[in-house]
Amino acid sequence: MSNTSRVARFGCRRRENPHQGNAMNTGFSFAKYAGADQTEPSFPEEDVIDPVKRRLAELSHLEADWDSYGGLPPTLVSIQSALGFVRLAGQQFWHAYGARVKPTSISPLPSGGIELEWRTSAELFAVEISSVGRWGYLRKRGSGRETRY
């Protein structure tokens, strides 16, 4: 079991509405720290969201046993929640991270969920969205003895 597949055991909670109760919808804004005279770049939704939609559409066509171990195809709830999460992350963090708000990997989970990953050479941020829309995350920084979760 990979570190990211264990993420579901930590910090998961049910979200009734994909726009409520998540870290991306806290009302936090970098704008007040950046200075009022700075203009935030606008979020180019088509550059970030369209590739995510295409990947999620591919995953929506998976059939049962897609992994030859009885894996369930992603549910509509998990697909919608994944798209909502990426959209909110992009809207909240585009001005700080630019194109890096686009996930580096979008993968199906055998339980019918979706995993989103953002990876750099020094950091991993993974979000697992369950088949019923619950989500959990793992943030890993550094490597070896310097690894921090």
Image (cartoon, grey):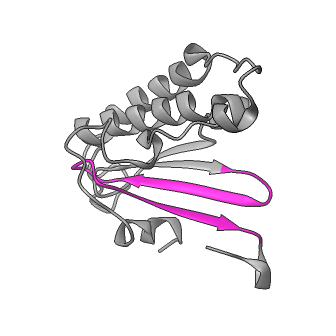
> Is residue 128 positioned above or below 149 on the image?
above
| 26 versus 121 height, above or below | above
Residue 18 belongs to magenta span: no
Say which quarter of the image contains residue 136: bottom left
- Residue drawn 53% across the image and 64% down it: 138
Magenta highlight range: 119-142
Quadrant hosting residue 74:
top left
Residue 126 left/right relative to 83:
right
Q: Pick whichever, 4 or 95, lies toward us.
A: 95
Q: Main secondary structure of the magenta part?
A: strand
Q: Report whether residue 139 is seen.
A: yes
Instruction: Please name whichever residue, 79 or 91, is drawn nearer the observer in this view of the structure.
Output: 91
The location of residue 73, given as percent across then percent down, is 28, 45
Image check: 3 left or right of 20? right
Query: Looking at this view, is 137 or 103 the one in front?
Result: 137
Residue drawn at x 52%, y 41% as measured from the top left: 28
Q: What residue lies at 38% left-to-right and 47% top-to-bottom?
A: 22
Residue 30 percent location from the top left of the image: 64, 37
Q: Is residue 34 above or below residue 131?
A: above
- Image spot of residue 35 (x, y percent): 75, 30
x, y percent for residue 50: 52, 19
- Can residue 97 be seen at all in this image of the molecule? no
User: Which quadrant would the C terminus be assigned to in this image?
Assistant: bottom right
Residue at (70, 39) in percent of width and height: 33
Whether 120 is among the magenta residues is yes
